[in-house]
Image: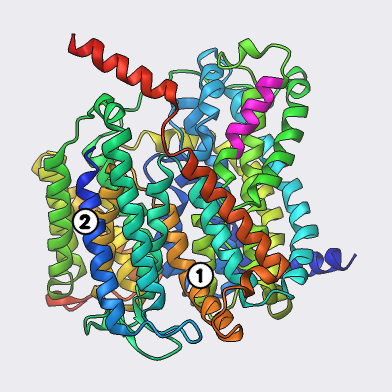
Amino acid sequence: MESLNSLLNGFSVVFSLTNITYCLIGCLLGTLVGVLPGIGPAAAIALLFPTAMRINPIGAMIMLAGIYYGAQYGGSTTSILLNIPGEATSVVTCLDGYQMARNGRAGPALGISAFGSFIGGTLAIMGLVLLAPLLASAALKFGPPEFFSLTVMCMTMVTYLSRGSFIKALMMVPLGLILATVGMDPHTGTFRFTYGTLTLKDGLGIVPIVMGLFGISEVMINVGTPIHRTFLKTKIKNLFPSLKDWKNSKFPILRGTLLGFILGALPGMGLSSTFLSYAFEKKLSKHPEKFGTGVIEGVAGPETCNNASSQAAFIPMLSLGIPTNVIMAMLLGALMVYGITPGPLLLRDHPNLFWGLISSMYIGNVVLLVLNLPLIPVWVQILRIPYSYLFPAILIFCIIGSYSLNNNIGDVIVMAVFGVVGYLMKRFDFEAAPLVLALILGPLLEDNLRQALLISKGSFKIFFNRPISASFLIVSMLIVISSLLRLRPPKKLREENGNSNNSQIH
Amino acid sequence: MQIKYPGIFFLLLSIYVCMVSLKLDLGTLHKPGSGFISFWSGIFLGILTLIMLVQDIWFNKAIRAEEKKEKIHWKAVFLTLSALFISILIFERLGFIISTILFVGFLFKFIEKKGWFVTILASLLMTFASYYIFRVWLQAELPKGILGF
């Protein structure tokens, strides 16, 4: 009941002309970047970060959050119409969505994806309303050891669930922690890795680094290996799914919501949830052989799942101050720029922001549903803008965005350097997400580690004597051990590769 | 992709970070110093790099040989990055408008190989549109440079 009252209070915060406008802008921009391959929500949030910092914290968070969940709506459009996922979470939508479009059913595919996203998103927000305050009040009992262990677990899980090599992803964690130490040590006042430069004395800014790693590097990848887009010439009709489509989709939508909600709240699981949803639907289907040929269940489940998961990701961020993905890390960074400490105290100290943000998501979901379907022809036209006209604009926005943070050219140089770093990381298959997460969580980890060791007089037992802290660390250890045991590729794969090489030699 | 180059880079980086951290003061376990986290992160990074290199040399050779080489337009990447760095260097001196016109013009002419008309028109349009959005509308501070606005 208390949550309901607070939520109503949140609605009163959102229902101001300014905040509604920010919500609308966020949702529209989110859909736009979701539609456009080559620029994702991370880069878009990084680009708008400096602008967002000029407005009030509630409006800024509403807008930035809108970009995130709006992108989940938009990502499906390119998957269905072009067979190119606008977002990583929409990869699986290509499988049946594109086939549906080829079969002349682009309308129902786009329709069920929008309705599914709305249902999944809205139900997940209800879960968020119930769970986040409970988790926040439980987290008030956390001390430095618990926060240290929780940070370690979060970084380990995100690393574990990264694509590609676990070792490579894990390497990005110490690298991010090293970068996080640049600047003044808050405990002793000593400058670390600053080399006498003013830009580095304040520490490496999250925004220029994220812009470089995600924005600039993405542009470089696309300049180096241009995307060839083939438009499917199909007429988009029947955006409202038929009764039969609804009948086939109702359970995938419900299952997708549940799965997305549970997995979205766990670090790094957002992306995997859509694949799991697809696998679930295929497994439970009476006609699994039809999956991949254009069945609506293959679109409804994953699309609902990715929206539920994107809303659920706010639970640990808002209640514990722990981001579960890069976007949440960036939103956390935004709160920190405002001098707001994310975590269990956020609900107590800034209830308007907490409940205002949650309420804005309800409105955002309605806005997205109402705007998205009629605007699909517009998004399709936007997709026809050649990349050659888009990438100079993205680069200009990156330069302006990083410069206008502090009117410091040093930030622009940091952005460009990390653009090169990000490009090389992509080329050598190193993931940027664990690095960014470690960079953002680094100060929290260091502060809590040092405090815990001060309390325990240098004994590491403090992390294992306390049950919550111990359980977080045990989970982390299990993850690392299980991943290290799988270092060697499966025997079958090695044998297959060996054979293929031999055959080539002969 | 050859992993030994990033491997060597990360190894050297971890050694460097450890050396600087030692100078910063590691402190004690009772009271960790300024270099504590960076030192242990450096050690951790070094160990992981060694594991990656060993894993690559011993186990993955066959798999790596199978990787398909995608065609990368290195010249375009190099030119774009060079233009980006040069535009950053002249950004404050020449100001936002001139540096952006030159930067966008270069990208259109030499990366996208557009004609002079499209190059000039697109670079002027993009520069003034972004100036209007960020400087006039959002009131962001942008360097004035030699034009004075």
Q: Which residue is mark 1?
A: A334
- The spot of residue A70 in percent (x, y) is 56, 48
What type is the residue that disc 1 sits on? Ala
Q: Which residue is mark 2?
A: B9
Near mark 1 (Cα within 10 A), the count class, few <14, some 14-19 or many ≥20, is: many
Residue shown at 59%/50% (left/top)? A478
Magenta stretch encompasses residue A277: yes
When the figure is inspected, residue A497 is found, relative to residue A221, above or below; the finding is: above
Query: In the image, is A396 to the left or to the right of A467?
Result: left
Which residue of the protein is positioned furthest toward the right in this rendering?
A1
Q: Secondary structure at mark 2?
A: helix
Near mark 2 (Cα within 10 A), the count class, few <14, some 14-19 or many ≥20, is: few
- The spot of residue A255 in percent (x, y) is 74, 34
What type is the residue that disc 2 sits on? Phe
> Quadrant location of the N terminus of chain A?
bottom right
Question: Does residue A370 appear in the picture of this structure?
Answer: no
Residue shown at 40%/41% (left/top)? A165
Query: In the image, is A186 to the left or to the right of A260?
Result: left
When the figure is inspected, residue A373 is found, relative to residue B9, above or below; the finding is: above
Magenta stretch encompasses residue A246: no
Residue shown at 19%/48% (left/top)? B5
The one of A425 and B27 positioned closer to us in this rendering: B27
**Which residues lie in the magenta part?**
A273-283
The one of A30 and B145 positioned closer to us in this rendering: A30
